């Protein structure tokens, strides 16, 4: 990979700052159009992106700390979009091993700790909720864990034990937060939010595990043994709820939550943060939003429906796109007939005789009830737990 040198003399092997900003604008243009709130400390990373967009010359003068902050901001702002920025390995490992990292590591670690509290709610719909206390969880917690474990390893290697311990404490707090959320949702019999949460937890701990492996953390490392494979292996430090949730995700939701490649084609979906994809398969409300929005026209909706059907055909047994389709067409004055001029005739006919239509014909109540019923009957093979 070619090395780029900024006017500040910072050499980077990752993406140039100006190109990174273009990538953000490509996948999340709404950030720069006044659609989202950027006030307050927890949204400062979004405000910073807008500031750089208005002052592009500043990007030539970044030091390593500020470039790290830019990469973090880029990933936080796009991780919930259809085309996330490709800076994962930079913020998880590459920049921590940069030749100038020694002089910047403390500040980078502080940014990492602070980012645990960044407000991501406007830049992702991949969320679950605990309605009783307003707690939200998303895949951003996994993004954070994957950066934090990179920071921890870098700090240990550079003999910064005290700061490494601070990072470790926050990682443990995040794990405990997710554990508590799952326990409470199970206790409250909130089947749908519990199911959503298992998909998010599996993603989050999966990212965490991958970066532990990426940094070659030895098996005898005490922190690794405390936190590794939490969704896969019983661990005396934590409730079996984590392994149970991992098995629930494997059984019910893993096929639904993937890269959504088919949804990258309809560029109109990038227009608003309201159009970001939620946790599958519970996509009825998302589809309704797309059907009702004044920001979309019918040709664009036709393209989206075609992408739903294409995604369904690609992803065997996934049902979320059919649910989104139902929400979208039910919001139109004449249902699918509203889009008859905007969809090829053969696509419409294929939809009508496909299992896609059968899934879409169920009401949201029927669909969710079936998932809840199946969850009630499921017995976890590793814990013997039932919901």
Image (cartoon, helix red, strand yellow):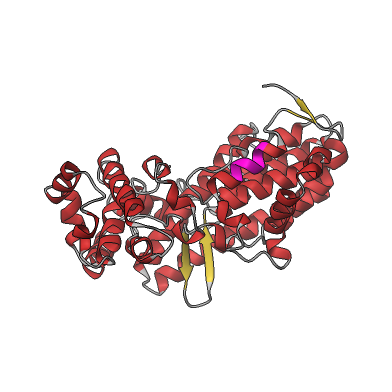
Magenta stretch: helix, strand or loop mostly: helix
Q: Please, is residue 349 above or below residue 323 in the view?
A: above
Residue 343 x/y as whole percent: 24, 47
Residue 234 x/y as whole percent: 47, 50
Residue at the limit of the structure toward the left, as seen here: 353
Name the quadrant of the N terminus: top right
Front position in the image: 51 or 99 = 51
Front position in the image: 74 or 161 = 74
Q: Does any portion of residue 159 appear in the rendered image?
A: no
Residue at 24% x, 68% y is 333
Which quadrant would residue 34 be assigned to in this image?
A: bottom right
Residue at 61% x, 51% y is 76
Q: Does any portion of residue 273 appear in the rendered image?
A: yes
Q: Is residue 157 left or right of residue 330?
A: right
Front position in the image: 17 or 372 = 17
Chain part drawn in magenta: 19-24
Front position in the image: 356 or 301 = 301
Residue 202 x/y as whole percent: 46, 49
Which quadrant would residue 98 be assigned to in this image?
A: top right
Residue 57 x/y as whole percent: 80, 42
């Amino acid at each position: 990979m070619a090395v780029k040198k900024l006017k500040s003399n910072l050499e980077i092997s990752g993406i140039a700052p100006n190109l990174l900003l273009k990538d953000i604008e490509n996948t999340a243009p709404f950030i720069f159009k006044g659609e989202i709130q950027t006030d307050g400390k927890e949204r400062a990373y979004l405000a910073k992106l807008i500031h750089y967009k208005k002052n592009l010359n500043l990007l030539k003068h970044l030091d390593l700390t500020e470039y790290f902050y830019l990469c973090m901001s880029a990933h936080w702002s796009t991780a919930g979009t259809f085309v996330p920025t490709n800076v994962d390995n930079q913020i998880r490992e590459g920049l921590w091993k940069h030749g100038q990292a020694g002089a910047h590591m403390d500040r980078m670690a502080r940014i990492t700790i602070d980012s645990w509290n960044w407000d991501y709610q406007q830049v992702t719909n991949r969320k679950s909720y605990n309605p009783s206390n307003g707690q939200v969880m998303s895949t951003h917690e996994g993004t954070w864990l994957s950066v934090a474990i990179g920071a921890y390893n870098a700090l240990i290697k550079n003999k910064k034990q005290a700061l490494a311990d601070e990072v470790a404490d926050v990682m443990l707090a995040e794990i405990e937060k997710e554990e508590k959320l799952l326990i409470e949702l199970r206790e409250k019999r909130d089947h749908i939010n519990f199911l959503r949460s298992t998909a998010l937890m599996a993603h989050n701990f999966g990212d965490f595990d991958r970066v532990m492996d990426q940094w070659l953390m030895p098996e005898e490392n005490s922190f690794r043994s405390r936190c590794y494979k939490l969704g896969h292996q019983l661990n005396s430090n934590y409730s079996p709820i984590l392994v149970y949730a991992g098995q629930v995700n494997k059984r019910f939701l893993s096929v639904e939550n993937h890269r959504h490649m088919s949804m990258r084609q309809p560029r109109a979906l990038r227009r608003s943060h309201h159009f970001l994809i939620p946790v599958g398969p519970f996509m009825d409300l998302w589809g309704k939003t797309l059907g009702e929005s004044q920001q979309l026209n019918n040709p664009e909706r036709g393209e989206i429906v075609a992408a739903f059907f294409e995604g369904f055909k690609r992803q065997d047994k996934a049902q979320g796109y059919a649910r989104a389709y139902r929400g979208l067409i039910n919001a139109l004055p004449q249902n699918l007939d509203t889009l008859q001029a905007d969809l090829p005739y053969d696509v419409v006919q294929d939809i009508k005789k496909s299992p896609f239509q059968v899934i879409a014909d169920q009401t949201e109540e029927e669909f969710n009830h079936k998932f809840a019923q199946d969850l009630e009957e499921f017995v976890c093979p590793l814990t013997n737990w039932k919901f």
